[in-house]
Image (cartoon, helix red, strand yellow):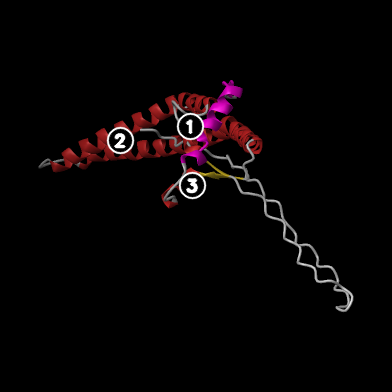
Amino acid sequence: MNIFRLSLAGLLLATLSFPVIGQRRRAAAAPKATAPQVAPAAKPAAAEMKIALIDTAVFGDDKEGIIRFRDAVKSLEQEFKQTETDIQTLQTRIDALTEEIKKLNQASVVSPETISPRQAEVERLLLERKVKQEKGQKDFERRYNEVANPISRDIGDALSKFAEQRGITLTLDVSKFMPAILTMSPGLDLTKEFIADYNSKNPGAATTPRP
């Protein structure tokens, strides 16, 4: 069981704004007797919108994801492996004592002196697990911000450049609204193309060492 939950936090996809097309002011009308009839000036056409879809859920995939982000996540998992093991060991002891108390309570005769020490030990272990789990989660979140967030920001910057180079005016994270999509042209999804482009320029980097 993974005690600490990983998430792709801090990555905000950039969206390019559309140029604002202002209406031209109409020229003041001249006297009807002397001014020829002039057709209204055609309004300038709005720039064509080009949309691309990126699935950020794939970024952390072991096989198809972004190498730097994937390696950072793995380094964090390894860093907190011992903490997770310690918490799981406490849970195992709690389960064993709870089962022992249950069996003793089912016996025909059992003295309070037999049950009380075991119940006290369970309560002590529960408190120890709670403290260790809360501290572990807090430490994990701090280290996640130190290690993963800079990579997330770099991915965001790279995605902006990727979109600009391809004339994309709007980039959407398909993972955020997948259930709402009914149809989609395969050409809109540029996830693999972006990941390949990013990985070719960022094959990997050392993670921030634990202080």
Front-most of residues 127 and 144: 144
Question: In the image, what residue type sits under mark 1?
Answer: Gly
Residue 211, x across and y down, in percent: 60, 24
Residue 60 - label: 1
Estimate how packed mark 2 is, as few (under 14), some (14 to 19) or many (20 or more) residues with alpha carbons within 10 Å.
many
Estimate how packed mark 1 is, as few (under 14), some (14 to 19) or many (20 or more) residues with alpha carbons within 10 Å.
many
User: Badge 3 is on which residue?
Assistant: 176
Estimate how packed mark 3 is, as few (under 14), some (14 to 19) or many (20 or more) residues with alpha carbons within 10 Å.
few
Left or right placement of residue 20 versus residue 197 in this view: right
Above or below — where is 88 with respect to 21? above
User: Badge 2 is on which residue?
Assistant: 94
For the residue labelled by badge 2, is the local secondary structure a helix, a strand or a loop? helix
Marks 3/1: CA distance? 15 Å
From the image, state whether disc 3 or disc 2 is nearer to you.
3
Front-most of residues 203 and 152: 203
Above or below — where is 65 with respect to 108? above
Marks 1/2: CA distance? 34 Å
Residue at left 36%, top 36%?
125
Residue interval drawn in magenta: 186-207
Question: In the image, what residue type sits under mark 3?
Answer: Lys
Give the mark nearest the N terminus, 1 or 2: 1
Front-most of residues 153 and 198: 198
Q: Quadrant of the N terminus?
A: top left
Left or right placement of residue 167 versus residue 100 in this view: right
